[in-house]
Image (cartoon, grey):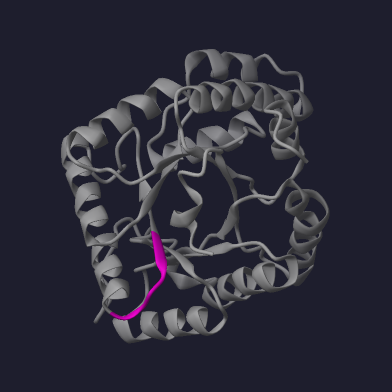
Amino acid sequence: MKIVDKFGRGRPVFSFEFFPPKTSEGVETLYRTIQRELAPLEPAFVSVTYGAGGSTQDLTVELVSTIKQQFGLDTMCHLTCVGHSAPELAGILDRLANNGIENVLPLRGDPPRGQDHFARPAEGFGYAQELVRFIRSRWEFCLGGASYPEGHPDCPDRDADLLHLREKVEAGSQFLITQLFFEPELYFDFVARARAIGIAVPIVPGVLPVLSLGQIERFTSLCGASIPARLHGRLQACPDEAAMVQVGIEWAIDQCRALLDGGAPGIHFYTLNRAYSVRAIMESLAVPV
């Protein structure tokens, strides 16, 4: 089913994001986690990320296909401009369509490891909206889009960043998922600004349940998000990582409640391939499990 058709049905759209494990054992562990712990939560859809430089291309396609076919979950495949020509991207999109995948998240992507700046691939694309237009020209996928409540790290002008986002929506993105953030006010301000310039598609907040202070400091440094002083202080005061996980759960519960009460159309959880925190949050939100 196309993800855009899941919105506007009177209930929040909950979804989970996974990344491709580095080993075959990790893949099997992920499948077990999905089957035993996360599929029973009945997410509206799940997504699978794409490695830097297209490094997980085959595995990402395999994961979204297997999750859909074996576990009956609607899936969305991330797809980046990095390291691919237009003909190569066309081959990947044909494979996805042949495997019954209906949803794609077109992204510019981060530079490959060891490179400081994104470089347009030969015969490829330099911006996500170019990839969106390319997909729209030949395929019938439902297309999502990434968005940044605190601004894209490569675009310090937040107003310009929002105009680029509108271009992506005008090119064919049908819903948006935000980068991680921790203060609900950032999301509501971002949505208000997006609506003011004519972006009318659903904007789903992306929520990351914190697992450790070091992890979240590393993630936010890469994506340009901020850590609230109150959250940072609570994590610093934790005696061990188990306590940090609990703080992350409690913070995410309060964050999700505020987002849903304020009218967010759902929550997209960055699971990091783990189930414990997401299950605890969903149970606290009284989502049937």
Residue 204, given in percent of the width and then of the height, sits at 45, 41
Task: Specify whether residue 197 is in view.
Answer: yes
Task: Specify whether residue 127 is in view.
Answer: no
Split into 4 quadrants, where in the image is the C terminus?
top right
Q: Residue at x 48, y 63 (%)?
A: 2
Horizontal placement of 107 versus 220: left or right?
A: left
Residue 200, given in percent of the width and then of the height, sits at 28, 43
Q: Residue at x 36, y 78 (%)?
A: 139
Q: Residue 130's image quarter?
A: bottom left
Q: Front-most of 285 and 125?
A: 285
285 relative to 44, above or below: above
> Which residues are drawn in magenta?
138-143
In the rendered structure, does residue 134 fall within the stretch colored magenta? no
Residue 121, given in percent of the width and then of the height, sits at 28, 74
Q: Front-most of 174 and 182?
A: 174
Horizontal placement of 270 versus 225: left or right?
A: right
In the rendered structure, does residue 140 fall within the stretch colored magenta? yes
